[in-house]
């Protein structure tokens, strides 16, 4: 059963929504955790699914994949907590340690070394991005959404997603490769900024 069917069935039997929750709760939680930290991750994830459940009758059941819809809700809720996110990014930049990063690790050793050494500079670069650009970049980088899924999640044209992503990647790359306070190890930005 695809997501559209499960959501359509859940209109009459709310327990059917559990299928969608089981498929995406961990991914949404991981995304929110990276954006806002452990203090808010559980609450915002729960609020994401409560909102989705409340508005499930409005979901277009012909869409077999609810992932963009759910991440769109999560991104909007993260946006409400934007100050918390920016404060967290600035704290990481000052302290040089990202307690949230321990919950997520890149696959390759080289990527892990670059990510850990670029942590403070990366946090500073992310904090400086416009909220819309940061949403797009992190939905692609941390939630693994496609351009089309990000466009659907944020209710934007795909061209706008591409231009925001390009602008965000350039800003992060520029910040990481030209920041004199960053560690000399990462001569290049992480692969997801390309």
Image (cartoon, grey):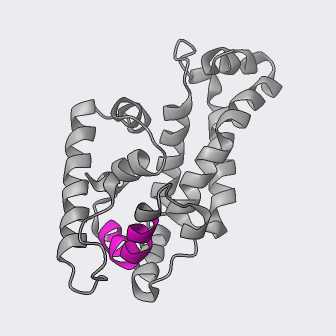
Comparing 18 with 100, the one in front is 100
- Examine the structure image and report whether residue 114 is included in the region drawn in magenta: yes
Residue 178 vertical placement versus 77 (above, below): below
Query: Quadrant location of the N terminus?
Result: top right
Q: Residue at x 73, y 15 (%)?
A: 9
Viewer-proximal residue, 102 or 73? Answer: 102
- Examine the structure image and report whether residue 18 is included in the region drawn in magenta: no
- Residue found farthest to the front: 109
40 above or below 148?
below
Range drawn in magenta:
112-127
Residue drawn 32% across the image and 55% down it: 191
**Where is residue 11 drawn, in percent x and y?**
72, 19
Q: Where residue 159 appears, x then y in whole percent?
A: 21, 33
Q: How many marks?
A: 0
Q: Would you place residue 66 above or below residue 51 in this image?
A: above
Report the residue at 58% width, 15% height from top.
61
Relative height, residue 183 to residue 191 (above, below): below
Find residue 172 and report its horizontal and vertical position in percent: 25, 64
Q: Position of residue 137 (x, y in %)?
A: 34, 51
Q: Taking 113 as reference, is 156 left or right?
A: left
Report the predominant secondary structure element of the magenta stretch: helix
* Nearest to the observer: residue 66 or residue 107: 107
- Within the image, what quadrant is residue 99 found in? bottom right
- Give me the residue at 68% from left, 30% from top: 20
Q: Nearer the viewer, residue 107 or 83?
A: 107
Relative to 66, is 148 on the left or the right?
left
């Amino acid at each position: 059963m695809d997501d559209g069917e499960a959501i359509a069935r859940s209109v009459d039997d709310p327990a059917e929504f559990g299928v969608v929750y089981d498929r995406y709760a961990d991914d949404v939680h991981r995304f929110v955790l990276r954006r806002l930290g452990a203090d808010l991750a559980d609450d915002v994830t729960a609020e994401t699914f409560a909102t989705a459940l409340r508005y499930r009758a409005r979901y277009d059941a012909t869409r077999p994949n609810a992932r963009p819809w759910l991440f769109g809700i999560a991104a909007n809720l993260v946006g409400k907590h934007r100050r918390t996110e920016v404060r967290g990014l600035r704290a990481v930049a000052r302290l040089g340690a990202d307690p949230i990063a321990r919950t997520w690790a890149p696959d390759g050793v080289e990527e892990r070394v670059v990510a850990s050494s670029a942590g403070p500079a990366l946090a500073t670069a992310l904090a400086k991005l416009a909220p819309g650009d940061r949403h797009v970049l992190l939905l692609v980088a941390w939630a693994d959404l496609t351009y089309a899924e990000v466009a659907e999640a944020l209710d934007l044209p795909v061209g706008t997603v591409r231009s925001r992503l390009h602008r965000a990647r350039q800003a992060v790359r520029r910040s990481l490769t030209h920041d004199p306070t960053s560690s000399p190890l990462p001569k290049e930005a992480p692969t997801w900024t390309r």
